[in-house]
Amino acid sequence: MTLPRRRFLHLAAGAAALPAVSRLARAQTYPSRPITMVVPAPAGGPTDTVARIFSERMRAKLGQPIIVENVAGAAGSIGVGRVARAVPDGHTLSIGYLGTHVLNGALYPLQYDVLKDFEPVALLATNPQLIVSKNAVPAKSLLELIAWLKASPDKASAGTAGVGTPGHVTGLLFQKITGTRFQFVPYRGGAPAVQDLIAGNIDLMFGQTSDSLAQVRAGTIRAYAVTAKDRVASAPDIPTVDVAGLPGFYISNWTGMWVPSRTPKNVIIKLHSAVADALAEPTVRHALAELGSETPSPDQQTSAALGALQKAEIEKWWPIIKAANIKGE
């Protein structure tokens, strides 16, 4: 049977529109099944802890279980890559941080683009770093620490959670700004580096607040400054870098949420609303504070704000990494 041309074109147009209609229908009923929250790090770490705090609170808002799945390996690129390849329907979320969604783009030949293959949902938490040392270091202030490092170039050692991690690139920027030189010692994570700092095997660290704050409180290591404009609420006695003598040295190992690119906008809006509701809960804010993290202000929580932050951080850190010729291991 031969179809009239007009009838044929009408049917062809309808067939072509079916995928878009299907995506729209799925978006309108979102979420229709359990959601997987992919954490590109082992269970028990700071990123995993933040993910579990939000998964519990978002479940009630979205009406579906949220399963936290830890997919570690290759500095987080395995887990992030899995989300980049996922169906863009909002049922697979990427939880990441400065390292996975900024630094890795300059360190590794990734099979995805950290910007183009994702849509930002919301900033979940900010975690400024602490500049800390072993207690045996003679410097009692940040300016004294800088003077001590300058007096003995290449003699001191700084522990990091690995090559190209936030603590490592923070140390590189610190060297550039202060004119100091010291050796970097990579570890398999922040916790073993802190343990060696306590033991006196390394001299200093630029570490996450969540990794080192408990040891500062216990008096086993010394803190010089927090790399933020404001003092950390859970440690108000530690001065900011502005007060300590290194103004503007602001660095945060922030945590955010993304979905695959082409995810429908109303799905992203639903997810963002669930995040915003969670951030408004005192229990969530308290849990983040216990980790040494800060709750983003409302203007920082928007999807656009996370996208702008990610782009700004790429512009800041990629040139530093490339100038130092650092390659991920």
Image (cartoon, rainbow, N blue to C red):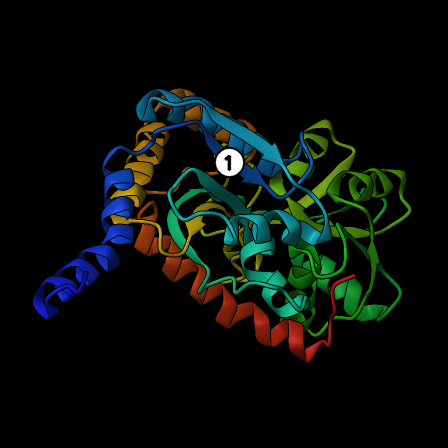
**Quarter in which the C terminus is drawn:** bottom right
- Would residue 63 appear left or right of 154 to someone viewing this image? left
Q: Position of residue 290 (x, y in %)?
A: 54, 27
Secondary structure, mark 1, is: strand
The residue labelled by disc 1 is 37
| Count of numbered circles on the image | 1
How packed is label 1: few (under 14 Cα within 10 Å), some, or many (20 or more)? many
Residue in the image at 86% along x and 68% along y: 152
Residue in the image at 59% along x and 66% along y: 105
Q: Position of residue 212 (x, y in %)?
A: 69, 38
Looking at the image, residue 262 lies above or below residue 79: below
Looking at the image, residue 99 lies above or below residue 199: below
* Residue 40 visible in the current orientation: yes
The residue most toward the front is: 1
Q: Splitting the image into 4 quarters, where does residue 90 fall?
A: top left
Q: Position of residue 71 (x, y in %)?
A: 65, 40
- Would residue 4 appear left or right of 181 to someone viewing this image? left
